[in-house]
Amino acid sequence: MSPRIGLDLPTLLDAATEMADRQGLEAVTLASLASKLNIRSPSLYNHVNGLPELRRQLAFKGLELLLAKIDGEVANLSGDEKLMAFCRAYLSFSREHPGLYAAIQRAPEPDDEELKREMAVVVERAVETIGAYGLQGDAAIHAVRAVRSFLHGFASLESQGGFGIPLDLDETFRLMVETFIAGVKTIRKSNEGTI
């Protein structure tokens, strides 16, 4: 097996991303990646310090692509349109990059401050989006958790073939987000002045 000339971390991550998105994150091992790149597994250690580091790098790449998608979709929008665009961007990312999506769902190691900061940026974008409904502090965090939960639930069910009835999934998704928006507005009205 002759070594691949010009292998660098971005090339390695592109190959790992392709594998993860086509075959699932668990299919990405050092051996399978080395085979795909036509190199010996030890050569990968020139770029990553083992499988946990490779998956960490995939999480960084996933977060970068997710944030770019969110920022592109929500630019110049506000209120309901902004939240709907945020949710659509999240789902679109999970559909386009199921392997990277899986990589960003794993909690970082307790001492991995860099990855925690990158993950916090996604939360900040969600808090900014929710802020249009007058939710701040703990109320905003609760709302962001709710958004993440229903988005992840929908994305996971869809990716696993959990929706068997032949109805338009995009319509179901739209109704789900609109229901959440209506609920947030109801909470805001009932708690006017306390949130």
Image (cartoon, rainbow, N blue to C red):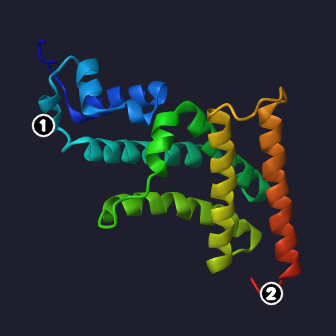
Residue 13 image position (x, y, % from top left): 32, 33
- Side of 33 relative to 126 (left or right): left
* Dot 2 amino acid type: Gly
- Helix, strand or loop at mark 2: loop
Rendered-image quadrant of the N terminus? top left
- Side of 147 relative to 49 (left or right): right
Residue 35's place in the image compared with 13, above or below, is: above
Quadrant assignment, res 50: top left
Quadrant assignment, res 51: top left
Q: Which mark is residue 5?
A: none
Residue for badge 2: 193
Residue 120's place in the image compared with 37, above or below, is: below
Residue for badge 1: 46
- Helix, strand or loop at mark 1: helix
Residue 188 image position (x, y, % from top left): 82, 75
Residue 7's place in the image compared with 105, above or below, is: above
Residue 43 image position (x, y, % from top left): 13, 30
Q: Relative to the observer, which residue lies in front, 86 or 58?
A: 58
Residue 35 image position (x, y, % from top left): 25, 19
Mark 2 is surrounded, within 10 Å at the Cα level, by few (under 14), some (14 to 19) or many (20 or more) other residues, namely few
- Side of 9 relative to 24 (left or right): left
Residue lying furthest bottom in this view?
194
* Dot 1 amino acid type: Asn
Which residue appears at 83% of the width and 52% of the height? Answer: 178
First-in-chain label (1 vs 2): 1
